[in-house]
Amino acid sequence: MPKAKSRPNPAQEAQQAGIGLLQTQAVLLPLLNACHIHRDTDHQHLGRAGWLVLSAHGEIWLHPSRRAQPAEWARLIATALVCLGLGAVQRREPQALWELACLLAAEHFCDGLKIGPLPEALWHPPLSLPAGGEAALFQQFRANPPEPTLIAWREAWCGADHPLFIELEATRHRWRRCRTRDDWRADFAAGIARGVGVALQVAAGHQEPGDALPRDTEAQRAKRRLMDAYPLLGALAAGFDLEQDPRQCQHYGIQVAAIDVAARRIWINPAAHLSDAEALFVMAHELLHAGLNHSSRRRGRDPFLWNAACDYVINAWLMEMRVGTPPVLGLLHDPALANLSAEEIYDRLARDIRRARKLATLRGTGQPDLLGDEQGPPFVDAEAYCRRALAQGMERLFASGRGTLPAGLIEAIRSLSQPPIPWDVRLAEWFDAQFPPPERQRSYAKPSRRQSATPDIPRPSPRLPPEETRKARVFGVVLDTSGSMAPKLLGQALGAIASYSLAREVEAVRLVSCDAAAFDHGWVPPEALLERYQVRGRGGTVLQPGLDRLRDLAKRSEFPAAGPILLITDGFCEARLDIPFEHAFLLPEGRRLPFTPRAPIFEIR
């Protein structure tokens, strides 16, 4: 015989529907996910006339057969969840008054969530609550006992002669960890923070009210934790969006995480299955990449080797600060590299490139986790925002006294907070050092023009410096005119040199242009460089013949023996130069010389 169909249970269906309504409440969802809801079919915990009881471990027992609408069951369960979230499920004598105070405080909070009404059997007259919450209301009830109607209202929740809060002793369950009041408070705080985010999404039009909430991931919890508990990275975390689409991560080859500073986006691959502590470490790692401007500080270095060098520094700092737990993949850490800068670690990695290429960042083996273009106003604006946010976070951390930071991290943040001196200002300082203002002399041989007003008082007039002094105020320029030098760069460099020469009363410039050979343009007045000036070359790059030409002129006393000279190049030159003069280099930003210079380098932006 076919089995008889089970009869529907309207009470159970309404309870399940009420739980479904709570799935759309962002504030209560963390509490709901941590709870276990049962039906007390044998009335072991709940009276026959009650509605529900709850334990300190998150067990909620519902009446198995009482009829109510789904919205009413949602409101009942929500009130119990708020009691847990407030950390109120505990023993305080008299217990009945404490439970009454907690129920009233939780019900008042649920009024703002607009979940639904309580069943008619649980209505009570309006009551004004004190500002101190359930604790203040409990003290008020102890001083002035509540009305009998409120006592009966509390008994209606759990049944007469039954407590509302059960299993208050800290017993350990075999199947799960025993949760404490702090755990429930943390879940409640996370839910409130998530509810604020959902409200902002609804206000912005990105989400409709009542839509199903996305799953709360480890990365989202890590971002909220950084914003709530880590002042150093809180502002940075708020400015970046999370991308957790597995298809996008597969497209970019991201195994664990990566960051795009210009787009203000962090990718976290859900397939990495990070724990909460690992997600916190990974999120902090990527944010430090942004806050310390590692993309723009690469300056022409190999992208992966520079990324790996920065990872060694960042991971050491995070482990010293004990921020989360490092993941297995992408952990570049070596105690032997402690207290070294990223630039020093890069030089060490560059000595064995084949071995360094086998290292793995959070993106994967041989792949940098710094994504995106490193040029243009959006990228510059994003890095400026990250730099300011990190500096402000450090100041808030020091003001609050919450923890300490590694000395290297403090030094790095403060150095980035000081804006770099523009290249033209540094070049001007170099000119000032090479050409101090000539001493002004006066002579009575020619009267001053001011003497005409007072003929009886003789006054000297300014006298020009001697011709020998004027002729000594000269310098040389070795100009790279190879095909790799952009015309705009040449014009910008020559214009700056001419302007500073005129401002410092430089008599002339000995200009030598170099490509595959040297071309001596002779002594050129500085004002001639401000006009359209034709240079020779546009072939290969060889600078040594130009330096040899100036050395020969110095031997014939046609050029100062000590210089100075300024070498303008794009860095694509010989790997060794013999420069017997006081000198400096002028290079485009991001370019490097093929050797270690012993003279100042000014980078044209």
Image (cartoon, helix red, strand yellow):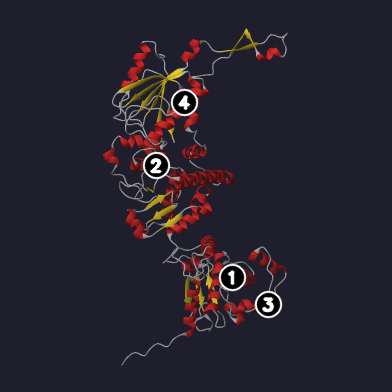
Front position among marks 4 and 3? 4
Residue at the spot 66% in from the left edge and 63% down from the top edge: 132
In the picture, which quadrant includes the N terminus? Answer: bottom left
Of marks 4 and 1, which one's residue comes earlier in the chain? 1
Would you place residue 247 above or below residue 482 in this image?
below
Of marks 3 and 2, which one's residue comes earlier in the chain? 3
Classify mark 1: residues with Cα within 10 Å, few (<14), some (14-19) or many (20+).
Answer: some
The answer to whether mark 4 and mark 2 are in CB contact below 8 A is no
* Image label count: 4
The residue carrying mark 1 is 110
The kind of residue on which mark 1 rests is Cys
Q: Nearer the viewer, residue 462 or 351?
A: 462
The kind of residue on which mark 2 rests is Cys
Front position among marks 3 and 2? 2
| Disc 2, SS | helix
Of marks 2 and 1, which one's residue comes earlier in the chain? 1
- Using the rendered image of the protein, determine whether residue 32 is visible from the camera's viewpoint: yes
Would you place residue 232 above or below residue 192 in this image?
above
Q: Label 4 vs label 3: CA separation?
A: 88 Å
The residue carrying mark 3 is 125
Q: Label 3 vs label 2: CA separation?
A: 64 Å
